[in-house]
Image (cartoon, rainbow, N blue to C red):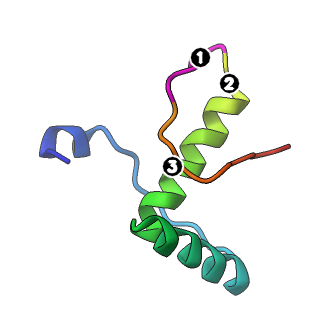
């Protein structure tokens, strides 16, 4: 990621129960990516699903079947 694209990124932290954190780490390990990267992807996916009129459907990055809020 370039410095320019990092400048356009909101940064914050979240707290989740230990078991969720462990399962998120397991999922991230299975995909060979950092846990924070997977969490960011999942948050973005949820926001895009919440506001589809603002975020038209795009070709999604392949990951395990993700159903957020369903």
* Mark toward the start of the polypeptide (1 vs 3): 3
Q: Are marks 2 and 1 in contact (CB under 8 Å)?
A: yes
Q: Is residue 21 above or below residue 28?
A: below
SS category of the residue bearing label 3: helix
Q: Dot 2 lies on which element?
A: loop
Q: Residue at x 20, y 48 (%)?
A: 1
Q: Which mark is residue 54?
A: 1
Q: Which residue is mark 2?
A: 51
Residue position for label 3: 41
Q: From mark 3 to mark 2, how far is it between C-alphas?
A: 15 Å
Q: Position of residue 70 (x, y in %)?
A: 85, 43
Magenta-colored stretch includes residue 57: yes
Q: Nearer the viewer, mark 1 or mark 3?
A: 3
Q: Position of residue 14 (x, y in %)?
A: 57, 67
Taking the spot 60% from the left edge, 40% from the top edge, the residue there is: 45
The vertical placement of 57 against 25, above or below, is: above
Q: Residue 32 location, x and y as percent? A: 40, 68
Q: Is residue 20 magenta?
A: no
């Amino acid at each position: 990621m370039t410095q320019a694209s990092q400048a356009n990124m909101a940064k914050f932290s979240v707290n989740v129960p230990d078991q969720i954190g462990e399962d998120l780490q397991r999922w991230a390990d299975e995909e060979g990516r950092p846990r924070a990267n997977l969490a960011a992807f999942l948050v973005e996916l949820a926001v895009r699903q919440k506001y589809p009129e603002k975020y038209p459907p795009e070709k999604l990055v392949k990951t395990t079947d993700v159903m957020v809020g369903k």
